[in-house]
Amino acid sequence: MNKIEKKQQFLYSGNEALARGAWEAGLRVAAAYPGTPSTEILENIATYTEIDAQWSVNEKVAYEVAYGAAIGGARSLYASKHVGLNVAMDPFMTSVYMGINAGFVAVVCDDPGLHSSQNEQDTRWVSIFGKAPLIEPADAAEAHWFIQEAFVLSERFDTPVLFRMTTRTAHAKQNVPVGERTEAQTRPLVRDMAKYVMVPKNAYMRHIKVEERLVALARFAETARFNQVQKGPAKLGFITSGVSHAYVRDHYPDAAILKLGMLYPLCEKKIRAFAKSVRELVVVEELDPFLETQLNALKIKFRAKHPSYRIGELRPEYIPAIVTGKKKTDAPAAVRKPSLCAGCPHHFVFHALKKFNAFIAGDIGCYTLGALPPYSALHSCICMGGGITFPEGLRRGAPGQSVIGVIGDSTFVHSGITGLINAAYNKSKGLLIIMDNAITAMTGGQEHPGTGKTLKGEDTKLLRIEDICAVCGADTVDVIDPCKHRELEELVEKRLKEGLLSVIITRHPCILKK
Ligand code: SF4
């Protein structure tokens, strides 16, 4: 009998592989807010009956729910896109001080090239800022493997672990060998006030632990299986990580490569030894000079990419030019311009708004596409929830200007409610339009409290957005089907003339709603 048992394999994307690996690791609780390119992680995790998975109303809430579950004794996971972690930064920073009980991993997917994001921030810096270990897989198979190791690392060092993916590692598919689920040991909830109550004195003591932990993690990084030396003739050597590894390997199949899977803290000794073993060392990384900065601090000599490559996605064809130190010369790749779907209810709203010559302050969602022709009827978009607070500021800064705020239903629940309370409390007037399409549409159609369904498709309490607006302090709240475009125009005109704090909810389901 053949003693080597062949593992079952599935063609998985990085997000699917990560979900499978987390399930095998005994994951019990997961929480997230949808956001490209991370959305499929929770959609896949939710298919496993052993895991209590939820769409939370925003990333801060998701982080706190998942982290609380880890303190409660269950292996837990948070997931979001890069800008989502900004929303969760408050609990993230202090959770690193508090440590964990059962393993806790925060998965964050970056979007180099801004396929679907408002900025191109590089989450790797957060690990240094927050003093948390950072793991980054290079492909789907590693996502499946590393996520299991990340839970072990979390429990061994009593720390939340940052797990970074990018669009290509999250979405590219490959055959992934899988295993079976291992139930993680239950860890009883303990009342350890010195560890879990972050008043200044306790937090000070925990900060000492954090610094000690970083030293121990750096020692661990030297032998960690996350970091792999791939030998070649000792002429040309690369230090790389993530999807950049595949591009380097394709172009230089015989080169020596130190592929880093644990990017913070770095394995200093291993890097020094590798640097000595090659005649020329090149660092290849996507976006910011994260590895370069750390290697510079170690005074290790290497060739860095030209700064022009810090913007946009790294492409395989750039690698030879990076090795020879050349500047990026190509223009951004031609992309098909996005547009609202034919028949989208938002068409009617922008058609109406265009007539009022107002400054339209928007938010994050399909309706951001109102900024593009043929409407060109959206004039700002900064972040989730900004469609209410930003226009309040505009009205205060430019009192004579007609300003209308625009936000979606999911975004209103995410972080718009506090903005409306703020406007009412501070006696702000003006018109806000909530474009309610009964789904989180831009990320592919996820449920939220206003849809009355959970992530697992179960019926739940339905949040009535009009009731929330009324109790937040709106002077008038109207609900209208935007397809009645003449009535909508008349209503907008009326509410603008009144000069009250008014909300109009334009309610019509997204035509792609399942
Ligand atoms: S997905 Fe739905 S809300 Fe988004 S543009 Fe298409 S129809 Fe409109």
Image (cartoon, helix red, strand yellow):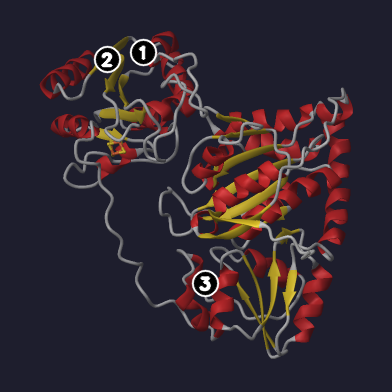
The residue wearing badge 1 is 466
- Where residue 358 appears, as percent x and y from the top left, is 21, 32
Q: Residue at x 53, y 63 (%)?
A: 287
Say above or below: 259 vs 118.
below
The single residue placed furthest to the front in the displayed view is 1
Say above or below: 267 vs 362.
below
What's the residue type where badge 2 is placed?
Answer: Val
Is residue 235 or residue 287 the one in the foreground? 235
Q: Residue at x 85, y 38 (%)?
A: 206
Which image quarter has ligand 1? top left
Element under disc 3? helix
- State if disc 1 and disc 2 touch (CB < 8 Å): yes
Would residue 106 appear left or right of 419 to someone viewing this image? Answer: right
- Where residue 492 appears, as percent x and y from the top left, is 19, 20
Residue 122 in sight from this viewpoint: no
The residue wearing badge 2 is 479
What's the residue type where badge 1 is placed?
Answer: Glu
Say above or below: 266 vs 467.
below
The residue wearing badge 3 is 307
Distance in Å between CA atoms under marks 2 and 3: 51 Å
- Where residue 108 appears, as percent x and y from the top left, is 59, 47
Q: Quadrant of the C terminus?
A: top left
Distance in Å between CA atoms under marks 2 and 1: 7 Å
- State if disc 3 and disc 2 touch (CB < 8 Å): no
**Dot 3 alpha-carbon crowd within 10 angstroms: few under 14, some 14 to 19, many 20 or more:** some
